[in-house]
Image (tube, rainbow, N blue to C red):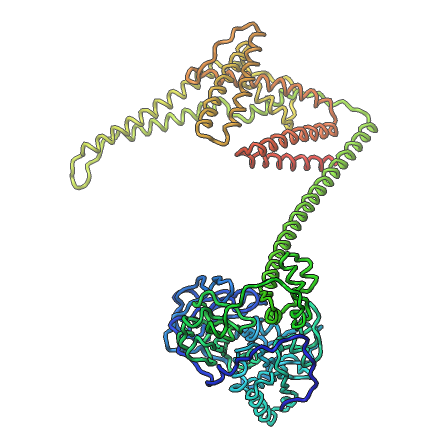
Amino acid sequence: MTSLIKLWELPGGIHPPQNKAQSLALPLGQIPLPTQLILPLNQHIGAPAKPVVQVGDQVLTGQLIAAADGTFSANVHASSSGRIVTIAPHAIPHASGMASECIVIETDGRDEWIERQECSDYLVLDRLELLAKIRAAGVAGLGGAGFPTDIKLAPKSTQVIDTLIINGAECEPYITADDILMQVNARELLEGTLLISHILHHPRQLLVGVEDNKPKAIAALKEALLELRLNRAEAANIQVVAIPTKYPSGGAKQLTQILTGREIPSGHHSADVGVICVNVGTAVAAWRAVRYGEPLISRITTLVGEALDTQRNIEVRLGTPIDYVLQVHGFDARKGSRVIMGGPMMGFTLPDLRAPIIKTTNCLLAPSDTEMPLPPPAQACIRCGLCAEACPVDLLPQQLFWYAQAEDFERLESHNLFDCIECGACAYVCPSSIPLVQYYRAAKGSIHLQELEKEKSDRSRQRFEFRKARIAKEEAEKEAKRLARQKAAEEAKKKLAEKASSEPATAAPATDVVSAAVAKASAAQPSPEEQKAKFERLLAAAKNGLEFAQKPLVVNEAGAEISEEQLEKQKARIKQAELKVAEAEKKLAEFIANQASAPAPVPNTAAADPNDPVAAAIARAQAKLAMPPGEKAKANLESLRARLAKAQEKADAAKAEGSATADALQQGVEKLQQKVAEAEAELKALGLETAPAATPASVTPEAPANAEQNAAQAAIEKAKAKAAALANMSEAEKRIEQVQSLKTRLEKARERLAKAEAEGDANIEAFRTGVSKLEEKLKEVEDTTA
């Protein structure tokens, strides 16, 4: 029944011609299914849905084809059965004519439904289960911008909802989609009201607001409410409220103010003042989703305008092309130059009629040129103030217009530009025909882009600052570790010094490290008798092989004669066996000759320390020492020249191939050149002439042996000096010396690594591995010392 509750006056507002009778002359109709359905992935506020089907898939009516992506998103379902033919950008209903990702279904005409899950008693389900059913059905606001209904019906815990408003005002001229819905589906609308009330924990007031220019809808609601109250006690809380006809009383904020007197603050929503406002079509869609398990695949749309032969309301499947709908209703493009989606106040001209019907398409207006002529050119503002009087949000449209022209975004925001609902009342009353709403929309878009750029810039700055802080933290940690290691080393050194000063110096027993090294090396090498026996065994094995190869061939069981091929193979085997015998005899003879001319071994004149690595090095070097100084110098020079020639060949080849190691090889050549120059200077100091540099081909076989003996002599001298120095050190001093040596090596390795990284050397990883190993060894020695 119509309530007599107090109503509040809406500030501003206008009374344009209603023009609603044209589309109400015929009952609600339907049109045949088109051959193709075009379903955009974004028919709602929030993120586009993600496709869950592929091209070529067969789908049924009501089947999920795109799933909601995140909280602020909505599912998309197939409006009819058929085959997916493409998933690609397509024209969508938008003022810019933009294209967006769409799923195109080629209908099969059978309209086969998926299996639906009905719920005869939703009271047995909890609130979250009901919201899940509504979300699964893809229900979004059918009267506004398409806000996901499950999000709207889940207010914050701090928002106490005491009033539910079902919006049936439908104040926009020409549009009667909600009017016809209330006439034919009044019972389902009231059932949906009780469902939403149950989800919102039964608000105190349940108000159905309808403008008083819809007498048939009000009568149908009253009749349905009387029947419902006989079966449902909670229906007694529902009140049908007739409000005065005034544009734009159908806005959510405006209707809330009219019915409750509560004004929604700037930047807030109706839930912040304890009110939830839901469109009548949305309430019916939510009810059908819960009761019958039906997803949102159709809606009621008004077809009106003098350019159409038939003006009426139809229930149309989502995705139906607009040009197909217009064609069914006899659209004559010669009568009208444009088609408007929405009403004349808040609608927009469609740039592309191939765009489809979507969830928010409440009206297609095709006016003739005489019915709705194009607006005259805009003139200068005369500051009459009519726009401020008409504004239902108490803004200053004139000031906003000036700031929008000047792109003064800061003042636009301070004058609450985003509170503008773009109803068009200001432009309707403007005597200068200034398209004020278009200025406001453009300014909102510019501010939005500016905010996106600022967010992007802020994210970049935060990443940069975080990186700087991370690097600073890492450097601080490295410095702290270095200082800790340095402090530990200094403390260890101090303790060793104190211990050394407190203990009397004791002379280490004199040991002949050279003799010990010689003995150790000799023990590790096989004896001449063992080596001779080895060569004799090789010779015996080669002779046995020759005897086996020389055995005559045997005729097979079939009596076939020996072929020429078999004889040739035997000859080859004999030849190969003879070569092996000759090679074994040669090696044995050479060994015997070398033993006969070998110098006498160096006598072991002192005891050796078997655990001393220096002694082992001396032993290995002394074993090769058998030449006078002049010969050693010459051999060393020849060896260096041979190495230089090979290094130069490798460097030239690397340069020719453009290898990354060319620079490193060239550095090696330069070092070898320096060593050759030093060897030549040493020969001159001994009073010997230096032979000209030999090519690699002219290097004699004796050169490697001479080079080895020369290197051995240098190693012996160096090891003796080191052994003499170590002999006078205590164990603690030896440890300190080892630590210092490792630090020096580590510093040089780090320098080589830094240089390799700067030059992009291909062997960087090898340098890094060397540095890591030295660091580990140094830490191990320092820990042992501590």
- In percent of width and height, residue 603 lies at 59, 16
Viewer-closest of 22 and 232: 22
- In percent of width and height, residue 122 lies at 58, 83
In the rendered structure, the answer to whether residue 568 lies left or right of residue 699 reads: left
Viewer-closest of 622 and 581: 622
| Residue 545, visible in the rendered structure | yes
In the rendered structure, the answer to whether residue 373 lies left or right of residue 777 reads: left
Viewer-closest of 400 and 323: 400
Q: Quadrant of the C terminus?
A: top right
In the rendered structure, the answer to whether residue 692 lies left or right of residue 609 reads: left
- In percent of width and height, residue 358 lies at 49, 71
In the image, residue 343 sits, relative to residue 727, either above or below, namely below
Tell me what residue is drawn at x 46 percent, y 81 percent: 312
Tell me what residue is drawn at x 50 percent, y 30 percent: 661
**Name of the residue lying farthest toward the bottom:** 230
In the image, residue 69 sits, relative to residue 271, either above or below, namely above
| Residue 67, visible in the rendered structure | no
> How many marks can you see?
0
Tell me what residue is drawn at x 57 percent, y 90 percent: 219
In the image, residue 98 sits, relative to residue 245, either above or below, namely above
Q: Quadrant of the N terminus?
A: bottom right
The quarter of the displayed image where residue 133 is located? bottom right
